[in-house]
Image (tube, grey):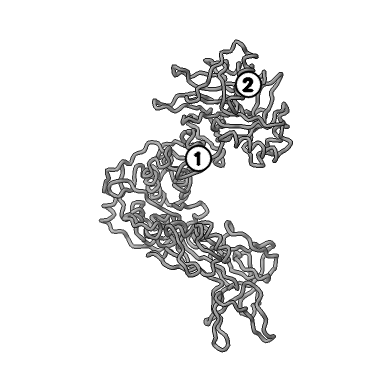
Amino acid sequence: MRWATKQQRPIGMYTVIAVLLWTSFMMFCQQSASASTRLDKIRVALYIESENYKSTVPTITLSAQQPINGSLRKASGDSLWWTSSQGNQVKASLDEYFAILSENTSYSTVKGWHDQLLNAKHPVQIHAVERGAGRTYQLVIGPYADLAAAQTQAQAAVKAVPSASGGSPVIQGPFRIQAGSYSTAEEARSQLTAIQQNGIAADLVYHENTSGSLVFSVWAGASASQENLNQVISQLGQAFPQLNLTPVDTSKPYLVERLDYSAGEQSPVSYLLLSGNGDKLVLAAGESKLTVEQKSGRTYRGMMELGQYNGKLALINEVPFEEYLYSVVSAEMGTGWPIEALKAQAVAARSYALERGLRYGIAHVTDSTLDQAYDGVEYDDVIQAVEATRGEVLTDGSKVISPLYSSNAGGQTAEPEEVWGNPSSVYSSVSSPDEAAAKGKLAWYRVWLSSGKAGYVRSDLLTEVSQKNRAGLPYYEAKEASVNVRAFPDANRAEAVAKLDLGERVVVFGEVMENTAYEWIRGTYKASELQQMMNRSSGQAVSGPVYSLEVAERGPSGRVTSLKANGKAVDIRYPDAIRTLLGSLPSTLFEIEETGRYTIIGADGATRSYPESALQLHAVDSSGTSQIREDHLFIMDGSGEVRLATQEPAFVFHGKGFGHGLGMSQWGARGLAEQGYSYEEILKHYFQGATLVKD
């Protein structure tokens, strides 16, 4: 699926389309389905390692407005294990391997090393132990899945910041011995301090005893091997002969707590290490939302479940289903859209999420655009739209469907065969009022510089002068300094190919609208660039530079369904994959401009076609004949139309629409709503083979 972004949401209207038949509309609204349309809570994967989606981080940082509690998830229900004693923030990772690079009693010294390693992209923290009369700070990197990775990364970190090395890095691992078990955390911490004072690594651990009651233990060692742990056991025996040392059972749930001082000497944060045996820790903060630092500080409703899945740390946001939609619709359309369009989006998003099931094993959906955009942001008008349609879904008469939608259909939605190559009774190609996405946008001029380069400049940055060149094309000059000349008309996405000084002149030979979700330009791509782009996406799509690229077939809506490169068919898995093949084009509703393809008619009527001809081009004027050396040149046809050409093969894509184009167009839904259509009518227009039901 392809989703809208907030930058693609200007207001506009569309001419009226055909009114839906009342009978069809009433049948659409009144039919029912036997499929279940209920889901009390939805599980959203913020980080997960799954077959269908891979996005993970080694450490999660959560914060809230209220204290955070941690509960062990059991079949019988969640059991409270842990409450933050260090403010309203917590870090968590899997209990794996860490590397202690150095220790120092000076916090500022360790903090300096920490910041350097952080800039070098190492997962670094500052931990602390009680030694002698004060606190010793440890410079730690990790976690890592195995001993070899920890050793390798420790060497890399020391190489990146040599001053941070305290000698040979000490690798910590999951080998431990239990050195006492207590009924309170305070008692356990007292024993922990005593052990650390003797230079022995130890941690406070939450776990259950044989009767299932929560206990607080000190596990010593944190060793990388059994051999290292044996040395720790010997040290403990000498220092604490009265201690009853017992093996730890890591097959049962446990939680290690450390303190992280990375944020400041006076600002320690609880750092939790989770057992990697499938246990789940659920973190919640009462009615407060939870903020995830690794998600750019986004804030979410509900609770967060942490655990190991497929060997990696997984973070699942479990949230009431309808409240999940508050954020989805806010992310997909944003605030200020017509309420009927928001309602249509709410029904589509609800149906999509319900149809997924537990697609990711432990989660129904991800927060990415692989499913539906979900960033925790909510708007009041969106909440109103979700609540107004609560429980309403689209079905095929027997089960909930997954109604696809995209940002902009470019005026006409796609047939299923044009996207995935398979038919579907739910979708049909229909007209879509999508032009509003382009309303209010500036025109851009296509310009030619004295250096021979070509590009696009925003029209308000140039002013016309009275002079014209010998081809009759007008000169314009820059109204200010450092005016960007872009590769295509998009200030946000297109790189600057040149800059104009104040008053610098350019030749203007075309005018286009700024890139929007409705209409866009991509390119120019040289033959070798296009080859690399296509082969990066599809192995060996073409065997050499692309000298010609043509549309071989189009579907009913005009979308490209097959291509030929250098005269040969390009192998694609399904039609919509053409977008990725050609460098992530916004849609497959496009035309190809081959700037290196043209035919020259000589004075004697002879013709020469490029790029087939290898002969050089010459210009003839009153001063004689000269070889054309610039890459860019102007071609004028018999009717006086001028276009830019290149001596070498190059390609520009001119298209409409943003996304696959199948199902509902979000911009089209807006246009229909502005014409007075209800959300039921909007849904019926785009999903003509579906039925709207409410549980």
Q: Does 16 sit left or right of 614 as displayed?
A: left
In this picture, is 455 found above or below 338?
below
Mark 1 and mark 2 in contact? Answer it, CB < 8 Å: no
In the image, 253 versus 695, the foreground residue is 253
Q: Amino acid at mark 2?
A: Gln
Q: Say if 600 sits above or below 53 in the image.
A: below
In the image, what residue occupies the spot 61% across and 79% down?
A: 471
Q: At 37% across and 47% down in the image, what residue appears?
A: 347
Give the quarter of the figure containing the C terminus.
top left
Q: Residue furthest bottom?
A: 604
- Furthest residue to the top? 242
Crowd class of label 2 (few under 14; some 14 to 19; many from 20; radius 10 Å)? few
Indicate the quadrant where residue 364 lies. Answer: top left
The x, y position of residue 420, in whole percent, is: 40, 56
Report the disc number at residue 423: none
Local crowd at mark 1 within 10 Å, few (<14), some, or many (≥20)? many
Residue tagged 1: 47
Q: CA distance from mark 1 to mark 2?
A: 38 Å
Quarter-wise, where is residue 480 in the image?
bottom right
The location of residue 502, given as percent across then percent down, is: 70, 65
Q: State the residue at coordinates (47%, 31%).
A: 287
| Nearer to the camera, 555 or 401 | 555
Q: Which residue is mark 2?
A: 231
Q: Tell me where residue 548 appears, x and y as whole percent.
A: 52, 70
